[in-house]
Image (tube, helix red, strand yellow):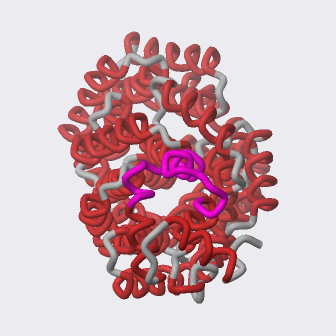
Amino acid sequence: MGDVAQAVERGRVAYDARDWPGCVAELEASDRVVALELPDLRRLGIARFLAGDAAGSVETIVRSHRVALAQGHWTAGAETAFWHAWMLFLAGEHARAAGWLARAHTIAEEHEVDEAVAALPATLEARHLVELGRSNEALELADRAAATGRRLGAPDLHVLGLLAASMALIRLGRGAEALPRLDEVMAGVEADELTPTVAGLAYCAVLAACLSLHDVRRAAEWTTALADWCETQSGLVPYRGQCLVHRTQVLTLEGAWTAADAQGRLACAHLAGPPQGDAWYHLGELQRLRGDVEAAEDAYRKANSAGRQPEPGLALLRLAQGRTAAAASATRRLVAEEGRLDRPDVLVAHAEVMVAVGDLVAARAAADELAGAAASLASPVLAGHAAAAKGAVALAAGAPAEALDCLRVACRQFVDLGLPYHAARARARVAEALDLLGDADAAAYERDAARESFESLGAAAEAAALVSAEGLPGGLTAREMEVVRLVATGLSNRAVADALVLSDKTVARHLANIYTKLGISSRSAATAYAYDHGLMT
């Protein structure tokens, strides 16, 4: 029996040291000789979950529940019923989860149960209400649970309540109000107050919330913190996969694309089901930005097979492929769908696609809605996207001075946030605006800076597009070359505008710049120049 007691003690030490496989091995060895007591069964259940044995963890929880009821430990009975319900809910078995949640309630009603444990079911009920679209009810219920946890000094209850309340606020479009709650959650995590399972859950939930709110700075901070937290624990299996998905997103935004690719592939290998779909989607986004159409298409297809809709990324891929009609159909459908948590991403894509197809009314509406979302969420990232979208609309509408103002704002915002790809795209459009305003030297500098950024990132297609604009006859830009070629075929300004999805005013500006650069004064002279210099081949 002394050996058994020593094994139990070693299991407890391993638990405290966050050595999950070691804890499992020692407690399982003890349990085979003498049944574990409730506190050690609780440790075994948590350690099995964190070591990746979800089925074994559930078996231990259910066994703990039976032992607790048999011994009249009603608080432990209610708590184990709650955690079994929680795991069933996360697995999508909502009916079974409801049954175990009802059991937790019944135990609390019929017996004397710790107040904090009696309040735990409210946190799961609030999450379910959010999924049912009853977020106002969920918010009230979750806030009460969080307040109870704070009053009783019960950190797990407090944090689970705050997370459910944050989820409800985000669904209600009140993301700015969710942020203080999310920060409070992470303060509890950093203070090491939570059980390991709740701490891991908190990390993943907060990261997902920050990314959905386009709060890149918070997401980057907590992604790093989660990676560090995972490294402190031996044999940890849960959270690493989802951590890798978030890490992929953050590294992609920050421009560390080689590292993002490695993290994304690891996530795809670690995960299954919808989480794996998220991993493939974000890997597809990275390949799209790199200009690897085939790899992006493959990743989006795998995301869809795993249950993750490959939009709006697939629509932007279609746009890059020149399939503008397909892209426009997709984003018009997406923007008409209600209740999408990724609506800001949809709006960014929709604005870009609508500019490309010449629907400036729809593009302007998307840009305005983005600006509203940026203000309500206090999101610098969305403010940058809104400014970039407004600049693109102004460019297409033939208002380069207005476009320049908007695009400079977007560029500064993206540079300040450390988002090099978005900053480079804004600079490329700044160059277009400067070209239209006749400032060729300034435009060349901006174009060079954008090209260098794209090359550094590995955005091959966009870098190539800017390289192709260099060294053109007469100092013409790629867009001016398109205009000259179309004019040389005899098209009117209106027809050129229709062909290039530009306004008549923009075409007129391009022609004025072309005349100045080439030292000519008429359409016939432009036509002659095009044929004499081999521009029509």
Task: Identify the residue shown where x is 72% and y is 36%.
Answer: 307
Reply above or below: 202 against 309: below
Q: Position of residue 324 (x, y in %)?
A: 65, 44
Residue 460 visible in image: yes
Task: Identify the residue shown where x is 28% and y is 53%.
Answer: 379
Q: Please give left or right for residue 64 compared with residue 354 in the image.
A: right
Query: Closer to the camera, 305 or 326?
Result: 326
Q: Is residue 496 magenta?
A: yes
Q: Position of residue 371 (x, y in %)?
A: 28, 45
Q: Quadrant of the N terminus?
A: bottom right
Q: Please give left or right for residue 453 compared with residue 406 in the image.
A: right
Query: Closer to the camera, 411 or 74?
Result: 411
Q: How many marks?
A: 0
Residue 5 visible in image: no
Q: Main secondary structure of the magenta part?
A: helix
Q: Position of residue 396 (x, y in %)?
A: 42, 52
Task: Identify the residue shown where x is 67% and y is 66%.
Answer: 235
Query: Closer to the camera, 208 or 22?
Result: 208
Reply above or below: 124 against 216: above
Residue extending furthest toward the left: 151
Task: Identify the residue shown where x is 51% and y is 50%.
Answer: 497
Q: Quadrant of the C terminus?
A: bottom right
Q: Which residues are magenta?
A: 487-508
Q: Is residue 324 magenta?
A: no
Which quarter of the figure has residue 54?
A: top right
